[in-house]
Structure formats: C-alpha cells, structure tokens
Amino acid sequence: MPGKMQILNIIVIVLQYSLVLLVYYFLYRVVNIASKDLTKLAIEPQAYLSLQLQTGEGTGSNQIPKLIVISDEKALLSQIVYPIAESLAIGRSQNNDLIINDTFVSHEHACISKSKQTYLIADLSSTNGTLLNSQRIEEETALADGDVIQIGAVTLKFER
C-alpha cells in the first residue's frame, strides 16, 4: 500500500506543477499579445502621416481634415492624429470616435460635423465647456485651418 500512496502523491505533485506552468504560459501569451497591440497603436499615427506624405495628401485641396494632438498632459489619448470624415464625436463615453477619459470631459462633450465644405464644432451642453482658440463656444462654430480646440486636459489642432 505505501507504494501506491507514493505514486499518487507524485502524480498530484506533477499535476500541480503542470497547472502552475500552464498558468505562467497563459500569462506569457497575454502579455505578448498585449505588447504587440500597444506597439501597433504607437506605430499607427506615424504610419498614417507617412502614408499621407507618400500619397501626396496634405499638399492639395483633397486633404482629409483631421485633429492633431498638440498637448495631452495626462496621456489620455492613444493616437496623435484623428481623421474626420463626415463627423467626429468627442467625449468620455466609449460610443465616441475620440475618447478622452478625463473627469473634466462629459460623456458626450462635443461634435465636429461637415456642412457642405465647412466643418462645424458644437459643444453638446458639456459641464466644463469647449474652448476654440481660447474662447468658450456657446453655439455651433465654423472651424478654420489651424484652429486650436481644448477639451479637458487635451489640446487639439484642426487641419484641412
């Protein structure tokens, strides 16, 4: 009988160590995938800018309007460049196109939308307001190339 007990103890110990090794392997895979995703996020803005230069965008009137991050004191944003198609919703909620996870930013803070050939910015009745060129906007306002938008701790520049 003592021989069977020793064999069972050895099997249990081997299974315990196998479980520990599987947990470590799982954690290794999770960290590996996460680091690849973070590296991809860090590379994408530069790739976007180089793609613009290669295709000649940014030199003609067909340029895609975008918001460029000037200042992000709390490192709240994952990108440097945010292209604007027809509209761009800004806020703290996950439903927005540009998510700023800051307590000074409302869930649905502001919106930029295209109207004919003009882009308009509107504050969506946010608590702390939206600043356009250091002035708080009260109504929908047309954006010009180079305008500076401040929302919470983030400062963005509008470019056409």
Image (cartoon, grey):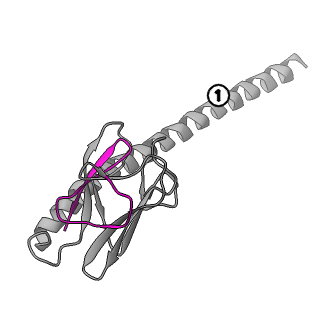
Q: Residue at x 41, y 50 (%)?
A: 129
- Type of the residue with mark 1: Tyr
Please identify the quadrant where the N terminus is shown. Answer: top right
Q: Where residue 128 appears, x then y in whole percent?
A: 44, 46
Tell which residue pokes out farthest to the right in this image: 1
Q: Nearer the viewer, residue 129 or 82?
A: 129
Q: Which residues are magenta?
A: 136-160
Q: Nearer the viewer, residue 79 or 159?
A: 159
The part of the image, by quadrant, that contains residue 44 is bottom left
User: Does residue 143 belong to the magenta stretch?
Assistant: yes
Q: Where residue 102 appears, x then y in whole percent?
A: 45, 42
Count of numbered circles in the view: 1
Q: Where residue 119 appears, x then y in whole percent?
A: 29, 72
Q: Residue at x 10, y 76 (%)?
A: 60
Q: Residue at x 66, y 34 (%)?
A: 19
The part of the image, by quadrant, that contains residue 12 is top right
On screen, 43 above or below 31? below
On screen, 158 above or below 42? below
Q: Nearer the viewer, residue 31 or 106?
A: 106
Q: Which residue is mark 1?
A: 17
Residue at disc 1, secondary structure: helix
